[in-house]
Amino acid sequence: MPSASLAVVRRAHPDMVRVTALSAAIALNLAALLFAMRPLAPQFANALETVKTETVRIIEPPPKAPPPPDIVVKALPKPTPVVHAPVVQVKHVDNPVATAPPTTEPSPNSKPVTTTPPTTTPPTMAPGVVSLAYRSSPLRFPVQAIRQHMSGTVLLRVLVDENGKPLEVQIERSSGHTLLDQSAREQVLAGWLFQPTEIDGHAVRAWARVPVNFALQEL
């Protein structure tokens, strides 16, 4: 007769060595994780402290300026016309009083009075500036002026005496060159002669304008 057997399932018992090893490994990993995360905690705290919160302020627009006052245009007052009255100067003219010449009766012992005509002194100076004729007018061109190509006309004012000789020479208008002006003055004063001026038949002194021309083309 066949025999039947029943299979009994056996439960495996936990291996304590393996469990202990796993527990130790897990504990070591947790310790390492905590140790690694420990230095990061202050950094996170400092980062949170350094974050500043910015406050948003709303700036209100400035108040509008009041409008300028209206410009009132006033008409200018019309100027009062000034009337200038003519000034009339009145001169008081005394009426001439007719006086009769005194009448004298001739006395028997009166003698006739002889009246001498007044003597007039001839003038010694001609009035104003006159034009005189030349009796002698030698002119020498300065050598230095020739070398520097100077030219021009000097107008002199000369006082001529009764004999026609220059007494005083003044430079009335320059030629533009001091050398020519001084040379003309010295030459006229030293060697020129004029025809004297006569008034009522008498030779008198007179001022005359004398032009002295220095021209290179005439040399």
Image (cartoon, rainbow, N blue to C red):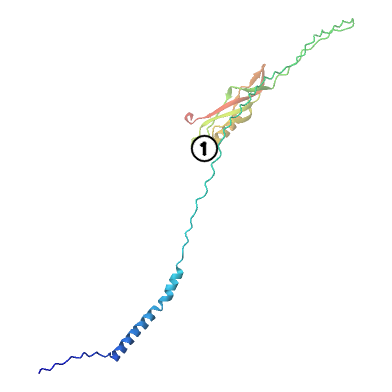
Whether 177 is drawn above or below 12: the answer is above
- From the viewer's perspective, tell me whether residue 89 is left or right of residue 63: right
Query: Outermost residue toward the left?
Result: 1
Q: Quadrant of the N terminus?
A: bottom left
- From the viewer's perspective, tell me whether residue 196 is left or right of residue 28: right
Residue nearest the observer in this picture, 68 or 145:
68
Element under label 1?
helix
Q: Amino acid at mark 1?
A: Gln
Residue nearest the observer in this picture, 84 or 180:
84
Residue nearest the observer in this picture, 210 or 6:
6
Camera sees residue 187? no
Report x, y in % for residue 67: 53, 42
Q: Residue at 64% x, 27% y: name it.
A: 159
Identify the residue position indicated by label 1 in the image. Answer: 144
Report x, y in % for residue 74: 58, 31
Report x, y in % for residue 49: 46, 70
Where on the picture, by quarter, is residue 164? top right
- From the viewer's perspective, tell me whether residue 114 is left or right of residue 213: right
- From the viewer's perspective, tell me whether residue 60 is left or right of residue 27: right
